[in-house]
Image (cartoon, grey):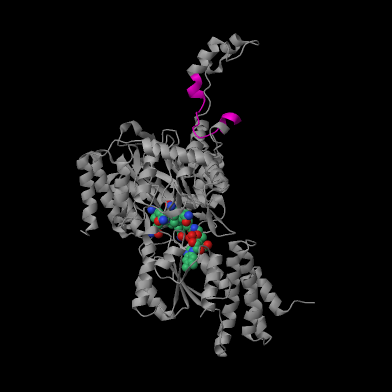
Amino acid sequence: MTPSIFEELEIAVIEGDSEQCEELAKKSLDQKIPPLDAITNGLAKGVKSVGDKFSKGEVFLVELIMAGDAMKAGMSVLLPEIKASKAEMKTLGKVMLGTVDGDIHSIGKDIVATLLEAEGFEVINIGEDVSSEIFVEKVKEHSPDILGLSSLLTATMPAQKEVIEMLDKAGLKDKVKVIIGGAPTTNEWADEIGADGWAGDAVSAVELVKQLVGGN
Amino acid sequence: MFNLLGRNEISDIHVASMEVLEQVGVMIQHDEALRILGDAGAVVDDKTKVVKIPEHLLQEALQKAPGRHLMASRDPKHNFVIGDGASYYTNAFGAHYTLDLETGERRLSTVKDLEEFTLLADFYPTVDYIKPHILPQDVSKSIWEQEMALAMFRNAEKHLSLVALTPQGWRDVIKMSMIAAGGEEEFIKNPSFIDTGFNNVPPLKYTPEIIDMILECAKYKIPFDISTGALASASSPVTLAGTIVQGIVENHAIVVLTQLVGPGTPIMWGSCATILDQRYGTAAYGSPENGLIHAAFAQMARFYGIPYYGAAGVIDSKIPDHQAVYENTINVLVATLAGADVVHDAVYGIVEAGVTASYELFGISNEICGAVKRIAKGMRVTKETLAADLIAAVGHEKNYLNTPEALKYTKKHLLEEQWQPVLTERASRPEWEKRGSKDMFQRAKEQVKEILSSHEVEPLDKDVEAAMRKIIDKRAKGK
Ligand code: B12
């Protein structure tokens, strides 16, 4: 039995083969397969399986990132068609991530972003050394379900608090759930500053986000 | 004693590094620094802030950068020369949490912890100079570096390496150090009374604050280490050789800039690079690859005639356990045998790679480092130590415990030949049981408490301390 186009898409993602994903996505359009199906039953399945394996320590970060890239390559072909047909793209939710003012540590935050994407969230990564004002502005602009603040330095942890206070002042605190992370942060710190959650690694960050979004 | 790279490999690494330095360049987000480099003949792109540095500029800078330099201390008996062939050790840097000595509970670090770890570092013979072991959480961030500096000056007579986190804080710390050194004039004559350290942002980038503080060091010729923070497979190539090439370029950019601004400023050319564990996405410092990275950098630094500073004893384990001890041991040993001039993070006393301090582990690591320093000291081979005459005199019937000549000989050479451990249990089993059958952790805990209650340092002169305090108060009031 030859594999279905869905299986082929799934495999291409698992193998992290961006070119193959693009080609298969085009092929699926030629075959008049609804693009949403190609995503849900093909690309997303692949990336989910790699994400699950990463959580169990069975695949390497590099494979996870390449699977994510392959999925995006396929999406770039399919998304315009979805938009054109006015069908609704459903993701698990929208997560915005950034490292706070004065802090340039990026690696941990980026890993959290990659894993969330693999799990089917839309992720907006706004970078490092992001001022509290910009966080508020970007929340206004994109209305994410979750905002994740990363801080690796003792000296920049107060900025996590500041962002939450500023969101509160701007009347946005109820509209977005704020989670925090980074090596020196803790659950207690999260409670103290009124964050909605804390996670100590990327795998638990995904669980946390799922829990918070599910509880909506 | 341990040469990882062959001559051809050294030369290949150098050639690849020069290619990257000249053709890829380094991003330096500081306009004044770019102007200085540009005026000297580097190719600067003002838009991208990338500077490409020709090899001849580097060679000129290396000519000016000292191959060795004195590190001065409050008590001159602790002075030493970095680059004299020995490996000098520091304690660990920067714990946000501390495992409480009484309860074992993980709690926020305090100024008292910083004072105690500094006092212990002053006592432990393996610590040659002292880093801020603790980042205290009970002090306002506006006077953080300043309070830390004062706490350290009050509790040590050894050379201090003070923390530079913000340009404003660092300028205050320099002012305070001038007071401690006996005035501005004294300090300017001998700026190696203190030192500090900086990291880059790999790949190939420097932030404005770091460059600002580096320029401040160059202005006074304050020694500092510049250490690449590359994580192989995340912020540098997965290949160790590729990571070495990138790190060399990152460090060299600062050698060039510094020697243009402050010719002769002592630089320790360093690395806190390691690998990223691809299964968890975490930085793996206690890894064997970390040791190899230090070994290669140490050789390359020697090739460039500049002292090497490697952060080599870092522990990933979350508690002071067996993993902690093996991680500390392997990389301190490798870096030392590879001839690192400074083994930073050697006497570690922290778990979770820089996050949580452990008093007991500090004691244990002092013991480990003592053993490694003994290995580094090597074996004395002279006519006297070969002892052929003595072997003949003792012959076949007697031994070295019942021959007066042999006893005299043993007494004479014992301390040179045999390292005397303090925490290591080598007594007989009955003896060990008699002393309470304690494991090393318990023994370390007792030792730490004993040192804290007995070790004293010469207090700071009252006026000196008051003048330093005044700088802190002024900053606290926001002036
Ligand atoms: C790599 C590193 C660097 C690199 C960063 C490269 C980069 N592009 O990110 C470089 C060399 C540039 C660097 C610079 C500095 N660093 Co640094 N750095 C580290 C190091 C060794 C590892 C950090 C890392 O990437 N870990 C791997 C990732 C995967 O782990 P993670 O970041 O913790 O992220 C995980 C979780 O925390 C969580 N998470 C992270 N973010 C988020 C966000 C959310 C929302 C959630 C839910 C979860 C989550 O999930 C992640 C994935 O599992 C740590 C040591 C340590 N033990 O953490 C020091 C460390 C953080 N750095 C430290 C310091 C002091 C500095 C410098 C100030 C040094 C200097 N004087 O130059 C500068 C800071 C400059 C600045 N303004 O930010 C200190 C901080 C001490 C403190 N408590 O303040 C540490 C602890 C080391 C130490 N003790 O010396 N650093």
**B278 lies left or right of B30:** right
Question: Image quarter for residue B476?
Answer: bottom left
Q: In this view of the protein, which residue sits in the foreground, A11 or B128?
A: B128
Residue at the far bottom in the pictured view:
A85
In percent of width and height, residue B95 lies at 42, 51
Q: Quadrant of the N terminus of chain B?
A: top right
Residue B362's spot in the image, x, y percent? 46, 42
Q: Position of residue B140 (x, y in %)?
A: 30, 58
Q: Nearer the viewer, residue B259 or A72?
A: A72
- Residue A178 picture quarter: bottom left
Task: Identify the residue at the far right of this view.
Answer: A1
Q: Residue at x 43, y 39 (%)?
A: B448
On screen, residue B59 above or below A202: above
**Start and end of the magenta stretch?**
B413-432
Task: Find residue A150 and report its horizontal and vertical position in percent.
Answer: 44, 65
**Relative side of B134 to A20, left or right:** left
In the image, residue A111 above or below residue B80: below
Q: Is residue B227 visible?
A: yes
